[in-house]
Image (spheres, rainbow, N blue to C red):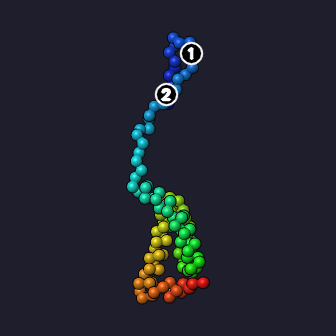
């Protein structure tokens, strides 16, 4: 910010403030930052919804999926979502190997 003294020929003796753009143009958010923000916004509502349904119908599955897992922010959110999806893949792989339901893997309904 620059300070300029008013014109000395005028009766005023105050300072005039003028902002300068020393920062340059605004930068665009990178694709990686956009993806990180999208995952960060997704994890809390998705975990809550999945937990609510699974707690009622498959509490053992809920315990497996959400063991040491909670919604986070930033890079921690990305790591958490990766862990969540890996656990879903494990359940899916078990089902593909000939099992028809989660109850066949010891995940019993209440």
Q: Earlier in the sequence, mark 1 or mark 2?
A: 1
Q: Quadrant of the C terminus?
A: bottom right
| Residue shown at 50% from the left, 84% from the top | 102
Q: CA distance from mark 1 to mark 2?
A: 17 Å
Residue 38 got which mark?
none
Between residue 92 and residue 5, name the one nearer to us: 92
Depth order, front residue of 11/24: 11
**Rendered position, 29 above or below 40:** above
Secondary structure of residue under mark 1: loop
Front-lying residue, 26 or 1: 26
- Marks 1 and 2 in Cβ contact (< 8 Å): no
Q: Position of residue 97 (x, y in %)?
A: 41, 86
Can residue 66 be spotted in the picture? Answer: no
Residue 82 at what x, y percent from top left?
Answer: 46, 68
Quickly name the residue at label 1: 12
Can you name the residue that lies furthest to the top here? Answer: 9
Q: Residues within 10 Å of mark 2 (few under 14, many from 20)?
A: few
Q: Residues within 10 Å of mark 1 (few under 14, many from 20)?
A: few
Residue 69: percent from left, percent from top: 55, 70
Q: Give the x, y percent position of residue 2.
A: 49, 27
Q: Residue at x 53, y 12 (%)?
A: 10
Residue 23 shows in the view: yes
Q: What residue is drawn where x is 58% and y is 72%?
A: 52
- What secondary structure is marked by label 2? strand
- Identify the residue position indicated by label 2 in the image: 18
Total marks placed: 2
User: In this orientation, which residue lies closer to the viewer: 55 or 29?
Assistant: 55
């Amino acid at each position: 910010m620059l300070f300029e003294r008013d014109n000395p020929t005028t009766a005023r003796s105050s300072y005039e403030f003028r902002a300068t753009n020393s920062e340059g143009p605004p930068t665009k958010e990178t694709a990686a930052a956009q993806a990180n923000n999208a995952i960060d916004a997704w994890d809390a509502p998705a975990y809550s919804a999945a937990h609510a349904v699974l707690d009622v119908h498959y509490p053992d599955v809920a315990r497996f999926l959400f063991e040491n897992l909670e919604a986070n922010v930033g890079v921690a959110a990305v790591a958490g979502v990766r862990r969540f999806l890996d656990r879903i893949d494990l359940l899916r792989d078990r089902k593909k190997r000939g099992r028809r339901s989660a109850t066949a893997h010891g995940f019993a309904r209440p």
